[in-house]
Structure formats: structure tokens, C-alpha cells
Image (tube, rainbow, N blue to C red):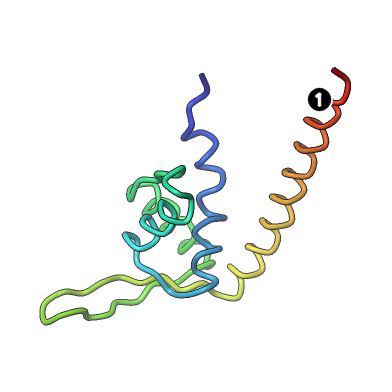
Amino acid sequence: MANKNYFMNGTTEFLILSLLEKKDMYVYEIVKSLRDFSDNCLDISQNTVYTATYKLESDNMITEYSKRVGRKRTRVYYHIEPKGLTYLQELREVYFNHIKGIGNILDAINNNN
């Protein structure tokens, strides 16, 4: 059986940018949203999300800022930048082309049986 993380690592940036397009978020909120929106089908670890956000930040796709919550607690929020929005659009096109292509292949295989 293929390692499920192999596939997920390729889509993590896409999913993070998709969430950040709607609003700024902190890592735990990203992880929880991915789990909740996928009906618990996707369980991407905080470490994986941190790794992806560091890469996105170093590529100038997102930026971070700190926000105080409560008296002593600070959260690091991530914000998508214009370069990230452009990259997200490219990723969306690739994703939907892949989904369409896979669907076409599976339909052709199923129709031949």
C-alpha cells in the first residue's frame, strides 16, 4: 500500500493557500479546518503544516504576523500575499486538470468492461 503522506505532501501547500485565501489563520486553525472540512478524511499533522508554511513563507507566498490573544498568549497568523494568490490559481488549474484527466481515464476503463 502506498504511503498516504506521499500524496498529501504534494497537496498540502494547495490546501493551505486555499484556506488562507479566505482568511488569515494560525497553524492549529489550519490543521483543524483541514480535518473538519474533509469530514476527518484528511489528518495532516501540525509538523507537516509548519514545514509547508515555512516553505511558502521563504518563497514569499505568505507572510506571518503575531497577534496577542488573551493576556499572555501570542499566536502567529499567516496571510497570503499576491504572489501566493497567483501560485494558488496555477495550482487550482493543475489540480482540476488532474482530477478531470483521472476521471476520464477511470470512465474509459469502466466503460470498456
Extreme residue toward the left, this view: 72
Q: Identify which residue, 68 or 108, lies in the foreground.
A: 108
Q: Identify which residue, 75 or 32, lies in the foreground.
A: 32
Q: Image height check: is 82 above or below 59? A: below
Q: Mark 1 points at which residue?
A: 110
Task: Give me the residue at 85% from left, 17% from top.
Answer: 113
Q: Identify which residue, 39 or 9, lies in the foreground.
A: 39
Q: In which quarter of the image is residue 28?
A: bottom left
Amino acid type of disc 1?
Asn
Task: Give me the residue at 41% from left, 59% from top.
Answer: 33
Question: Residue 59: percent from the left, percent from the top?
Answer: 53, 62
Question: Residue 30: percent from the left, percent from the top?
Answer: 40, 60
Lateral position of residue 81 relative to residue 73, left or right: right
Question: Residue 45: percent from the left, percent from the top?
Answer: 35, 46
Task: Give me the residue at 16% from left, 74% from top.
Answer: 73
Q: Image height check: is 52 above or below 80? A: above
Label 1: how many residues lie within 10 Å, few (<14), some (14-19) or many (20+)?
few
Q: Identify which residue, 20 or 65, lies in the foreground.
A: 20
Q: How many marks?
A: 1
Task: Give me the residue at 36% from left, 54% from top.
Answer: 50
Question: Residue 85: percent from the left, percent from the top?
Answer: 62, 70
Q: Image height check: is 73 above or below 98? A: below
Q: Image height check: is 7 above or below 111? A: below
Lateral position of residue 111 relative to residue 26, left or right: right
Q: Is mark 1 on a helix, strand or loop?
A: helix
